[in-house]
Amino acid sequence: MSDPDLKIASVTTTIIDVPLIRPHKFATTTAEAQPILLVAVTTEGGVTGYGEGVVPGGPWWGGESVETMQQIVDRYIGPYIIGRGVDEISGVMVDIERIVANARFAKAAVDVAMHDAWGRALGVPVASLLGGAFRTGVDVRWALGAAPLEEIVEEVTHKREQRLNYSFKLKMGALDPAVDTERVVKIVEAFGGEVGFSIDVNARWDRFTALRHVPQLVDGGVELIEQPTPADQLDVLAEINRRVSAPVMADESVQTPHDAYEVAKLGAADVVALKTTKCGGLQRSKQVVAVAKAAGLRCHGATSIEGPIGTAASVHFACAEPGIDYGTELFGPQLFAVELLQKPLDYSEGQVHLPEGPGLGVELDMDVVKKYARS
């Protein structure tokens, strides 16, 4: 039985729309602000933990949006878990599966909020609840928009000079494939091999297009190919992986432990993009990493453009999980035009550093939250 003070007294949600420093272009949409569902879990002992429901750019990615997540949490998950202990995360997440199918982004928000509340109540970091931190920071790859060459060169140069990021990702899939490929190769060539670049097509190319242009990208110096083809076409992804020398990373194709197993079985990728959001939270993410690690796959700490709460959760996870062994792209808060925390996350020397303190180790600036909250 849980301590009475650890029992959940309330679950509340707030949608905030956070402006970005520049438009962030995905394969099918462009975001100028990031909507975030903020989930607050408060215990009978008066401790509140926070989690985020965040999807990259809207429902085009996985079918969820902040609006659908809010309904799921407010009407189904929240009332169901009232009275349960925040230290019963495994049991709660198993039980939730019986009343809500899929909805992993919404479930991740609840999972993280419970971890945060539990850690705060015990006075220990979330990383300690996950086995303990074995490192204090992780490398961060920065994502670039579909800007002209001169602007991209300026942005990369600035990031390197400020010692914020040393490797970079280029989004593809929105332009004509030939034009897009030429653009990326020119960007890579502009740095003469001194900067590492990956690309992400967000599963928007068909087999013919991918087989034509992915080898050109690899020959042009791209060091990592992320999800060029549709998520369910693992045989095509495996064919591409066999044909190119650069590692292929599966993102949309891996959202569950079984997905990781199928990718490994078919040799469809060398690396898995591990998003704690798309996996359904920290507990389920551990299962995905375990399968990938057993199969010899690397794991990259990926992002759904989370705010500082979701990012802090992923940093705690990555610092406590040796299976995250191919760097991260946990840059979300760097893309925001406003600061949501009383003390910002520490981005320096190419890394994001583990926050100190109980729970997630971060404190929201509630005045800023209220300013950008939807009425």
Image: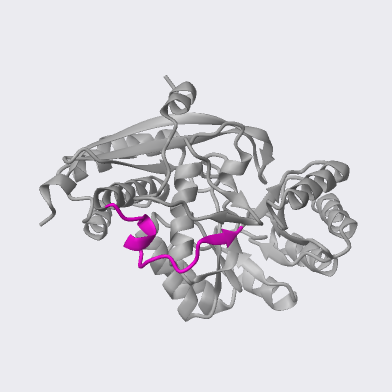
Specify the quadrant of the image occupied by residue 349.
Answer: bottom right
The colour style of the image is one colour
Q: Residue at x 22, y 55 (%)?
A: 87
Specify the quadrant of the image occupied by residue 25.
Answer: top right
Q: Is residue 209 above or below residue 262?
A: above
Q: From the image, which quarter does the C terminus lie in?
A: top left
The residue lying furthest to the top in this view is 375
Toward the viewer: 297 or 230? 297
Q: Residue at x 42, y 48 (%)?
A: 105
Is residue 289 highlighted in magenta? Answer: no
Q: Is residue 210 above or below residue 98?
A: below
Q: Is residue 117 above or below residue 316?
A: above
Toward the viewer: 182 or 375? 375
Numbered disc total: 0
Is residue 128 highlighted in magenta? Answer: yes
Q: Is residue 278 visible?
A: no
Q: Position of residue 310 (x, y in %)?
A: 46, 47
Q: Position of residue 163 (x, y in %)?
A: 71, 53
Toward the viewer: 62 or 89? 89
Q: Residue at x 57, y 42 (%)?
A: 333
**First to last magenta residue range:** 123-139
Q: Is residue 300 visible?
A: yes
Q: Position of residue 83 (x, y in %)?
A: 14, 44
Q: From the image, which quarter does the N terminus lie in?
A: bottom left
Specify the quadrant of the image occupied by residue 252.
Answer: bottom right
In the rendered structure, the answer to whether residue 16 lies left or right of residue 175 reads left
